[in-house]
Image: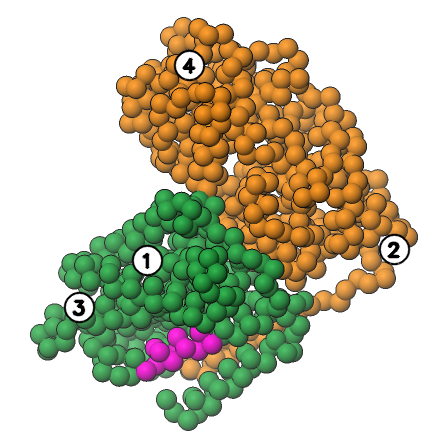
């Protein structure tokens, strides 16, 4: 990272930190908007690691997100952790990454492309149904209600979410610029060649899957601490996969800044649509996404001068990735 | 070619615009012109039918109130009209809290009106709790709401355990020859379905009804023939069905195709809407449905409200009375409080008796709940005949269904 880029990153982070002191967090929507955007940026970056850099299109991120939320809910409701407990947040991430390793080894060794995507999609549904079936342990279909009287202000939630978003970017930065990143990209570009050149393909795939799950689990726990009601339909909803996928693809998968731009932009688009077009906002949002995918297949970051073009080796194009995995 | 710098500038411009857009606007203060009431409802998505029905009733209540000039608020020494702002939660509990954030922080609502069903009411009530904005709730089982120990909301609904007893109380009125011998519970695989299923199973024990089969029903499964054949093979001749409207229609269709004869079929949630009759016609006869209210009941303005709804939508409703009465209570509470302050309005809700609503007289208990008995109706030639509460049935007795080939 150049000094200029580092300075820019510091300025942006400082500006984000200053927002709650400029806009009253209790009265202004800005802080909540940035809080949610930070969660989506974390989810998008984590998906970016698996799909953008490793080329494995996962549709099961909501499984890790929901699991993270439930870990915190179960532990807090039994007084094993407290409100906004860092141990709870880390445990949420650890639990999600353990699930990713458990599921990732068989899935990633046997499945590719569409089949891997479908396999991970199934994982989300399994987690949702399992949560319902576990009855009193998980609160069943009604979920777990957490003590909302603990809530004082959005500020700690905001700064934790912001820190997690920065952490996810830092993790991405260091991973992708290390030998791990080289391995991941080579797996993405040509798995057979990567294997032939001595890279333990399964190990690196599972590693990226587990790190992504860790970040997703932590973001689920942060949202759980904010909404205080954790139930299967909300936290295992497919939107927690689809939105980060869209944000990452729109911003530019396989790039560092793509998920950030995509996260902020799509969160803003959805919010504006909900507010100004309440009757037809799903149509508007859907059209926006369709047009974006059609005309920006490599995302906004793909518009950069010198950026890898559609179809080239350096660009991540989701359609190409799935096609390649099918053997096309 | 677009440069990286340009991308950043575009992104920054978007953010700056958003920041100004989402910035707080000035409060009305002493020159308050209206009372702003927010409601987070499922306007789109799977629960949109119920959400939009509730929305219609709220909007009618607001229109009727504003036609009289609004509510006299002593604090401002004038009548203020009500402005209703609906925030769509997209039938997604994960978006419910965000909807309340928008209502409180962007729309600056004074008070909040209920969402629909426990899985949306709970996250929205809890979000309201964080901002200490009074949430005037309904359609959430009080036992669920009590578990959250909320201080800034109240609930107006029926008790789950009492509602679950109704089918068995009705069955006990049937002559012995018409009573089903083998009973089944078919609950959709959702939070409400499972919660209600648990209540129904418990109530069955209390009324000494043995459940021969207790099965989850797939949501939007489109084909229940395998399950129906299983019911037939077990000789099931009575069932309680908890499912959405489309699923109930599919189930009854396929019941008829498979010649599964149920003497008693009591539907919850999906059989109450007029679309159920529209889809099935006379095949819907004998099916029971739940509901909160009927325009046939002798409460003030009930008939007129029901006729207004029927005129607009070409069908009757057994729910709008609850939603309309929820508003009537809130309007009166604001007037009695003399203020739109959440604490004062909630206090007024808790300490007054609200007479003459379309649900009758309403009084809240010290725990913040106001309870009414869940109703049961039987479809008969396009009308929903009151079966329960028995004192509201006007002499109508529930009919056991003959076999399909004898109808």
State whether residue B200 appears in this view: yes
Do tags 1 and 3 sit on the same chain? yes
Front-lying residue, B317 or B144: B144
Q: Which range of residues does the magenta coloring cover?
A: A163-174
- Chain for disc number 4: B
Do tags 2 and 1 sit on the same chain? no
Residue B51: image location, x then y, percent: 57, 41
Instruction: Return the residue at label 3.
Output: A202
What tint does the image give chain A? green
Instruction: Return the residue at label 2.
Output: B76
Residue at horizontal 47%, vertical 46%? A142
Tell me if mark 2 has few (under 14), some (14-19) or many (20+) residues whose alpha carbon lies within 10 angstroms of its own. some
Q: Which of marks 1 and 3 is nearer the N terminus?
A: 1
Residue at horizontal 32%, vertical 82%? A174
Mark 1 and mark 4 in contact? Answer it, CB < 8 Å: no
Instruction: Return the residue at label 4.
Output: B180
Q: Residue B250's image quarter?
A: top left
Residue at horizontal 30%, vertical 19%? B234
Q: In this view, does B66 lie to the left or right of A199?
A: right
Q: What element carries label 4?
A: loop
Q: Residue A60 carries which label?
A: 1
What tint does the image give chain B? orange
Q: Is residue B117 above or below residue B181?
A: below
What is the spatial separation of the Cα atoms under label 2 and label 1, in whole angstroms? Answer: 54 Å
Do tags 3 and 2 sit on the same chain? no
Q: Residue A263's image quarter?
A: bottom left
């Amino acid at each position: 990272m150049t000094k200029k880029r580092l300075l820019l990153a510091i300025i942006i982070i400082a500006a984000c930190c200053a927002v709650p002191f400029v806009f009253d967090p209790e009265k202004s929507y800005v802080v909540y908007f940035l809080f949610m955007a930070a969660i989506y940026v974390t989810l998008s970056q984590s998906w970016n690691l698996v799909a953008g850099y490793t080329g494995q299109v996962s549709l099961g991120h909501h499984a890790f997100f929901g699991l993270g939320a439930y870990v915190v809910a179960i532990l807090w409701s039994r007084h094993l952790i407290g409100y906004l407990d860092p141990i709870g947040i880390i445990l949420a991430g650890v639990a999600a990454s353990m699930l990713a390793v458990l599921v990732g080894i068989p899935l990633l060794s046997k499945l590719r492309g569409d089949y891997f995507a479908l396999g991970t999609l199934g994982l989300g549904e399994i987690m949702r149904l399992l949560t319902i079936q576990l009855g009193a342990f998980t609160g069943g279909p009604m979920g777990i209600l957490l003590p909302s009287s603990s809530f004082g202000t959005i500020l700690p939630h905001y700064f934790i979410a912001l820190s997690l978003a920065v952490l996810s970017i830092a993790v991405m930065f260091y991973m992708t610029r290390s030998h791990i990143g080289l391995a991941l990209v080579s797996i993405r570009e040509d798995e057979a060649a990567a294997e032939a050149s001595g890279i333990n393909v399964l190990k690196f795939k599972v590693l990226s899957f587990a790190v992504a799950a860790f970040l997703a689990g932590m973001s689920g726990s942060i949202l759980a601490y904010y909404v205080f009601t954790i139930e299967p339909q909300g936290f295992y909803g497919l939107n927690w996969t689809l939105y980060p996928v869209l944000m990452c693809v729109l911003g530019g998968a396989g790039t560092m800044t793509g998920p950030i731009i995509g996260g902020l932009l799509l969160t803003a688009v959805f919010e504006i649509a909900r507010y100004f077009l309440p009757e037809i906002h799903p149509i508007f949002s859907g059209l926006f996404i369709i047009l974006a995918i059609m005309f920006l297949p490599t995302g906004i970051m793909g518009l950069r001068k010198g950026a890898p073009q559609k179809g080239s080796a350096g660009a991540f194009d989701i359609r190409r990735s799935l096609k390649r995995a099918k053997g096309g | 070619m677009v440069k990286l710098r340009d991308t950043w500038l575009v992104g920054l411009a978007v953010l700056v615009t958003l920041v100004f857009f989402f910035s707080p606007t000035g409060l009305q203060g002493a020159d308050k012109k209206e009372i702003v009431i927010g409601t987070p409802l499922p306007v789109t998505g799977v629960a949109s039918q119920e959400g939009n029905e509730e929305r219609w009733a709220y909007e009618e209540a607001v229109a009727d109130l504003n036609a009289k000039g609004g509510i006299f608020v002593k604090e401002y020494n004038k009548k203020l009209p009500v402005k209703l702002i609906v925030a769509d939660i997209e039938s997604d509990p994960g978006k419910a809290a965000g909807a309340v954030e928008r209502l409180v922080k962007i729309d600056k609502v004074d008070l909040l009106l209920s969402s629909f069903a426990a899985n949306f009411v709970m996250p929205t009530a809890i979000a309201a709790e964080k901002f200490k904005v009074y949430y005037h709730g309904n359609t959430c089982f009080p036992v669920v709401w009590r578990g959250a120990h909320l201080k800034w909301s109240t609930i107006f609904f029926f008790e789950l355990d009492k509602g679950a007893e109704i089918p068995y109380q009705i069955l006990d009125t049937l002559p012995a020859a018409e009573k089903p011998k083998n009973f089944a519970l078919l609950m959709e695989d959702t939070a409400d379905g499972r919660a209600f299923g648990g209540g129904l199973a418990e109530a069955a024990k209390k009324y000494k009804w043995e459940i021969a089969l207790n099965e989850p029903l797939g949501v939007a499964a489109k084909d229940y023939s395998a399950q129906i054949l299983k019911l037939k093979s077990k000789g099931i001749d009575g069932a309680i069905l908890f499912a959405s409207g489309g699923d109930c229609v599919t189930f009854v269709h396929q019941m008829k195709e498979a010649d599964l004869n149920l003497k008693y079929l009591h539907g919850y949630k999906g059989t109450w809407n007029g679309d159920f009759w529209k889809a099935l016609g006379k095949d819907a006869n004998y099916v029971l449905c739940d509901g909160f209210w009927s325009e046939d009941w002798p409460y003030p303005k009930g008939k007129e409200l029901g006729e207004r709804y029927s005129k607009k939508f070409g069908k009757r409703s057994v729910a709008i009375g609850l939603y309309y009465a929820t508003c009537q209570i809130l309007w009166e509470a604001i007037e009695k409080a003399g203020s739109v302050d959440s604490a004062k309005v909630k206090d007024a809700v808790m300490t007054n008796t609200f007479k003459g609503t379309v649900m009758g007289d309403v009084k809240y208990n010290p725990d913040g709940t106001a309870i009414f008995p869940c109703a049961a109706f039987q479809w008969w030639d396009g009308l929903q005949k009151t079966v329960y509460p028995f004192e509201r049935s006007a002499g109508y007795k529930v009919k056991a269904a003959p076999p399909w080939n004898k109808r």
